Amino acid sequence: MPSRIEDYALIGDCMAAALVARGGSIDWLCWPRFDSEACFAALLGEESHGRWLVAPKDQAARVRRQYRRNTLILETRFETREGAATLVDFMPIGATKCCHLLRLVIGERGRVAMHTELILRFGYGAVVPWVEKVEEGTWRAIAGPDMAVLRTPVDVYGHNFTTVGEFSVAAGETVPFVLTYGPSHMPLPEALDPAAALAETEKFWTAWTAKCRKAGKWSDHVVRSVITLKALTYAPTGGIVAAPTTSLPEQLGGERNWDYRFCWLRDATLTLLAVMNAGYYEEAQAWRDWLVRAVAGSPEQIQILYGIAGERRTTEWELPWLPGYEGARPVRIGNKAHQQLQLDVYGEVMDALYQARRGGLQRSNAAIALQRALLEHLEKVWREPDESIWEMRGGRHQFTYSKIMAWVAFDRAVKIAEILGRSHQERIVRWRKLRDEIHAEVCREAFDSELGSFVQSYGRKELDASLLQIPIVGFLPPDDPRVIGTVTAIERGLMCDGFVMRYRTLTTPDGLPPGEGAFLACSFWLVDAYVLQRRWKEANVLFERLIGLCNDVGLLSEEYDAAQGRLVGNFPQAFSHVALVNSAFSLTGAESAAEQRAEPEPTALAAP
């Protein structure tokens, strides 16, 4: 049975990622890309579906773990009655043309008896490879196009289609394991020097994190979040996956299980803002360039999500042989949401390009041409109903957030034109007129005077956490009575155990059975709304509660089940960490501004 979601840590090489449980078992790894078929799939099933355990033989060993400071190198310390040893897990970045996963067992005290159990199962746990020893200390596993090569001095052997071995490590000793992926038709990949790979990996991460801008007392959380975002970036293209996992349930035992190993356009705005806030302009430019390439083509064919290299087809299908995480079925591969109409993505793309321009990114003629084509198409379709930001599968409606983001699209287009000093006054006048028309319609059709709040969609009474974006994107000022009323209504109607739900699932607007955790990004949006309304204390209290949900190594999933005290949904979730970064800088900026506005306190020496 897999571990709790919060008991996993992430390692990766900006090509693929693995999840490591506290007990030393790697239960999830897709090779050679984030969206490749998993060779370790125990996360969604059982040990027989693929995992790699390295752990003490003493099952009562005490476990403590951490990332090596400012890196993605995981250190798990095991303490037994006989001694202590540290398991160092990492995936080197750019070491060679092959993908590697390294596990180093370092003796710290006494002597610790260890064992390893490697269960490789290609094809999401369905395919048992042929394993053979090719030379001393080297074993090769092959199945179809896939090959994995294990190099270690440990004397391992096959038992019941599993590669097992026992060894011990004394203080000062290091026992290495190197697992390498390659195409099965190619020669064995060259051996890697474990010590050199560790040194180079640590050097890379410490140099990269040194550029991160400080965020006051929350700097450590920001650094861990930007490392996570970097780890979820597919280096060859600059695309950022929403999460490295599929089908981790939004409701334990439920069927809200989706594949998030793709790039969503709506992440563009917040991701660009987050990485630029943190000082990473190269990553922001790579993301913008990915965005331009992915969306290029006919504007009528824009999708809400793409593959990590910009692929358009993400066909959704199910894996019947995997029982799912804690029985949550079905296990889905692919995501048919790419077929949906979600008008908000136009606003998010335009806001991303606007933020890039404001942030000083180099001008891109391709981006300018793209925005013009998208706006011309949006002029024709903005009045249509859609499936909304939450990818509703229960039918299209006139969702308020979608209309607001259509307003954002034209608003940012006008602002970009003003920055560039464009002379196309006729086009700018048209965009301004559309911006005003959409604004008036939303204020007329989406505001419910009885509730004193904006609502999820025209003519209905439901609330939606996405309405917290109204002051954040500048649709209305934060002190507008309608904004204050909306925030109050969300506090009253969507707060559950102190966190914000996306919407009330009792109405099943997405066509699925009710029940899910609190969507963490929404609670961070409430933090941002509080900051804008100068509700400093409430913003700080909520933010501290949210970062308190991070697991022991600083990672967040998509949602939180307050009733069971569990992280739920795909993990780690880029959107959650993007929201954390943006809220941290929002709070830090607000505190700095407040300090600058503060008047000096009178002193006793000032008495007449």
Image (cartoon, helix red, strand yellow):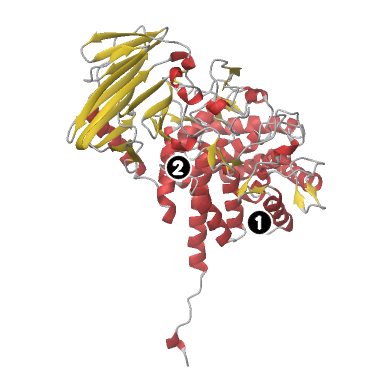
Q: Position of residue 110 (x, y in %)?
A: 19, 37
Query: For residue 425, which quarter of the picture?
Result: top right
Q: Is residue 278 above or below residue 235?
A: below
Query: How many numbered circles does the render carry?
Result: 2
* Drawn side of residue 426 relative to residue 22, left or right: right
Neighbourhood count class around disc 1 (C-alpha, 10 Å): few under 14, some 14–19, many 20 upward: many
Q: Looking at numbered disc 1 in the image, what kind of residue is underneath it?
A: Pro
Residue holding disc 1: 478
Q: At x 61% / y 49%, what residue is drawn?
A: 497
Q: At x 42% / y 56%, what residue is drawn?
A: 217
Q: Nearer the viewer, residue 186 or 362?
A: 186
* Drawn side of residue 91 relative to residue 356, left or right: left
Q: Position of residue 62 (x, y in %)?
A: 33, 39
Q: Nearer the viewer, residue 600 or 178?
A: 178
Residue lying farthest to the bottom in this orientation: 608
Counting residues from the start of the chain, the first of labels 2 and 1 encountered is 1
Q: Position of residue 452 (x, y in %)?
A: 78, 54
